[in-house]
Amino acid sequence: MSRGAEGGGAQRPGDGEHRPPVMMDVARLAGVSHQTVSRVLNGHAKVRQQTRQRVLDAMRELDYQPNSAARMLVTRRSNTLGIVTFDSTLFGPSSMVYGIEQAARAAGYFVTIASSRSLSRSSVLEAVNRLREQAVEGIVAIVPKDSAVDALASVPAGIALVGVGVGGAADVPMVGVDNTAGAELAVHHLLDLGHRTVHHVSGPAGWPEARERVAGWQKALAEAGAAEPEVLVGDWSARSGYQAGQAVARDPEATAVFCGNDQMALGVLRALSEVGRRVPDDVSVVGFDDIPEAPYLIPPLTTVRQDFGEVGRRSMELLLRIAEGEQSHHRIHLTPRLVVRTSAARPAS
């Protein structure tokens, strides 16, 4: 990078020194004042593009790392957003964290994550408070259980807040997938193939998305005038799906199963295989989530896909609008789509 006379022949710190570069080093190398460097760092509009580029080039050349704490004192902004999540290996919540984090970085924000020990009200509020102590500019909270959703209603009004999930905290803006519509897609697909009814392996009690998927299943059956079998309740795990699948396997009339997530569908596939009931020849199976492994199961799994990237983008857009002062009680429901593979077919008879 050529500096000419304006650069003043600045030397890189480190030539005979052992200290990290400071703002004055950047100013000398770029041939500007340290006030100009400060204005560039703080995103000030009244800096010529050519000058801004010289400063940025100098920062890269020196590997200069701004003091974020000092900058926050000047701008009163941390340029950081918080995510509240919980300890989970479930595909849905972990994918939501990734989608939100990517959207935040694309918007130019740093991200800090507070993991809640559980989804109890007190644990969620503790995670929110940890983020507030770090002066985040807004918080996105992944709240898949009733207790976690209810906790958001108690968060002080001074912080921009968006919940990701579904549920009934009336005063909290929420972004989530339309689980009822997704379940209807799955069940209508099976009924349209000619199955007389569809069994359902649901998620656990206390999870709004599990209730919504049950509601969608019930609605689709009612619209078709189909009988409603007893719900088989799981806990999202493949193990619970396997146990439910054993019950399905014992019922010779069962020809179709809609599972509340793909992990439980995996357990159902195993249970059916063990007793020689072939999928989809004897029993059709449809899941929910479209985990990365779904196309590689035997047979490849028909499932309902959630766009977690879009959930992240929409929650981030809503959060930033609220952080800028917009009053919002939005409920954004994103429509999932059915991904048809070969685990569902017309009944043999």
Image (spheres, helix red, strand yellow):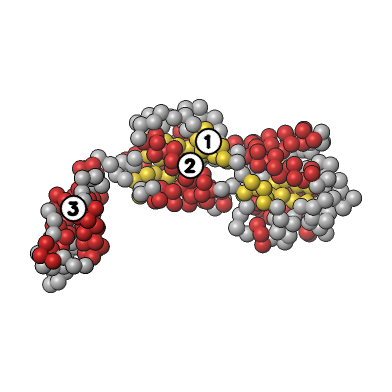
Query: What numbered label is drawn on residue 314?
Result: 2
The residue singled out by tag 3 in the image is 37
Kindly state the secondary structure of the residue where label 1 is placed. Answer: strand
Q: Earlier in the sequence, mark 3 or mark 2?
A: 3
- Residues at marks 3 and 2 touching, judged by CB atoms closer than 8 Å: no
Decide if residue 146 is in sight here. no
Q: Whole-Å distance between the Cαs marked 3 and 2?
A: 34 Å
- Residues at marks 1 and 2 touching, judged by CB atoms closer than 8 Å: yes
The residue singled out by tag 1 in the image is 332
Residue at image point 54% right, 30% down: 168
- Percent across and percent down for residue 218 are 73, 35
Q: Mark 1 is on which residue type?
A: Ile
Residue at image point 19% right, 62% down: 20
Quarter of the figure with residue 31: bottom left
Query: What numbered label is drawn on residue 19?
Result: none
Q: Mark 2 is on which residue type?
A: Arg
